[in-house]
């Protein structure tokens, strides 16, 4: 539905929290922001709300992408799996093996990444900070709402789904360029002209983080897959969708997605539901009115912090009964 000449939304305005509404209207008021499409799982974030897609004329914004550059969801159909027939005890064994193989939270390991980062902006400190974490966080999940899930559909086909991003390397890149934008631009403290040195440098460093995020998910997928099938397996087709990125279009405009995924016509996607509902495999419609985009998740009624304070562990366990 149309909210203003610049804003379209998949949900009524009154259902969007006040903080997110303010972020939408504040950013739409910028002259070279051409359009903002609001996804169904919209909520307040840093600068541009999460669950928003912004089309910007001739400018790129690190804060419109966010700190976890390339965060996304990968889903893989496991050939010839027997997971659905395993006992609860065997499933728990698999769960424990995955916990050993993949560091979560702030845990790290030594797992050198094959690529070496050199910032296109020429900043040695940024380069050193990113490289220091590449070898420690390649193949790590992180925290927050990142997850590894093993599930199966009504045909008993097993799927592995992984939600994670570029970890600290992406955070360092995003943070450096956001701070640089504040220093360089006195009118709007979050944009670079796309053809400026810093604009092109951010695009290059952002793309490095996108590649690292995908490689990170694939490394974890291989580890999980080896545990599930019991031997080294060869990866076939998988679905991967970033939901924090920017793309330069042919006309020079920049399409920013923050907590939103690409949904070009015929494009396969994956949208996680709740922890109990599993994930949904989707096919894009290429709806230009909504900038060919879709939600990146099921949405939420409360923040994780609020949920921890207001939902007891006993209530949560009851809601998750039957889910390992």
Image: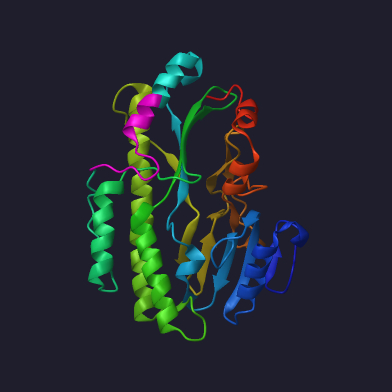
Please report the residue visible at 39 percent of the width from the left and 59 percent of the height from the top: 171
Q: Nearer the viewer, residue 17 or 253?
A: 17
Task: Please indicate whether residue 42 sits to the left or right of residue 190 in the image.
Answer: right
Count the marks: 0
The quadrant in which residue 93 appears is: top left
Q: Which residues are magenta?
A: 96-110
Asked if residue 290 can be seen in this view, the reply is: yes
Residue 104 lies in the magenta stretch: yes
In the shown orientation, is residue 270 left or right of residue 129?
A: right
Q: What residue is rendered at 51% in x and 74% in y? A: 253
Vertical placement of residue 82 versus 292, above or below = above
111 relative to 102 in the view: left or right: left
Q: Position of residue 294 (x, y in %)?
A: 60, 53
Residue 66 x/y as whole percent: 47, 62
Residue 210 higher or lower than 194, as above or below: above
The image quadrant of residue 17 is bottom right
| Residue at the far bottom in the pictured view | 186
Report x, y in % for residue 303.
61, 49
User: What residue lies at 43% left-to-right and 71% top-to-bottom?
Assistant: 178
Using residue 164 as the reference point, say whether residue 151 is left or right of it.
right
Residue 35 inside the magenta-drawn segment: no
Viewer-proximal residue among 314 and 105: 314
Question: Which of the two residues, 100 or 261, is positioned nearer the viewer here?
Answer: 100
Main SS of the magenta part reads loop
On the question of residue 248 being in view, the answer is no
Q: Is residue 196 above or below residue 284?
A: below
Whole-percent x, y for residue 212 in the image:
33, 53
Quadrant location, the N terminus: bottom right
- Which residue is at a point 60% across and 39% down the rendered structure image? 273
The chosen color scheme is: rainbow
């Amino acid at each position: 539905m149309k909210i203003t000449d610049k804003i379209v939304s998949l949900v009524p305005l009154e259902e969007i929290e006040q903080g997110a509404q303010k972020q939408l209207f504040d950013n739409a008021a910028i002259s070279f922001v051409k359009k903002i499409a609001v996804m169904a799982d919209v909520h307040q974030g840093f600068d541009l709300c999460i669950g928003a897609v912004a089309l910007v004329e001739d400018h790129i914004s690190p804060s419109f992408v966010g700190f976890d550059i390339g965060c996304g969801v990968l889903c893989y159909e496991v050939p010839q799996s027997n997971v659905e027939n395993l006992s609860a005890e065997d499933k728990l064994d698999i769960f424990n093996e995955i916990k050993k193989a993949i560091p979560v939270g702030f845990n790290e390991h030594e797992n050198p990444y094959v690529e070496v980062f050199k910032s296109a902006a020429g900043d040695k400190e940024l380069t050193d900070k990113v490289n220091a974490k590449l070898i420690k966080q390649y193949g790590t999940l992180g925290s927050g709402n990142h997850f590894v899930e093993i599930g199966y559909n009504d045909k008993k086909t097993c799927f592995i789904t992984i939600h994670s991003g570029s970890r600290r390397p992406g955070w360092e890149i995003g943070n450096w360029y956001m701070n640089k934008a504040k220093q360089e631009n006195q009118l709007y403290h979050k944009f670079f002209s796309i053809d400026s040195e810093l604009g092109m440098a951010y695009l290059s460093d952002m793309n490095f983080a996108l590649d690292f995020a995908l490689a990170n998910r694939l490394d974890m997928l291989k580890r999980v897959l080896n545990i599930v099938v019991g031997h080294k397996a060869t990866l076939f087709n998988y679905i991967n969708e970033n939901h924090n990125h920017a793309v330069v279009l042919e006309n020079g405009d920049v399409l920013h997605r923050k907590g939103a995924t690409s949904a070009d016509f015929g494009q396969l996607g994956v949208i996680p539901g709740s922890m109990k509902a599993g994930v949904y495999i989707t096919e894009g419609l290429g709806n230009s009115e909504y900038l060919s985009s879709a939600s990146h998740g099921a949405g939420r009624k409360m923040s994780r912090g609020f949920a921890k304070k207001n939902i007891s562990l006993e209530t949560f366990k009851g809601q998750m009964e039957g889910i390992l």
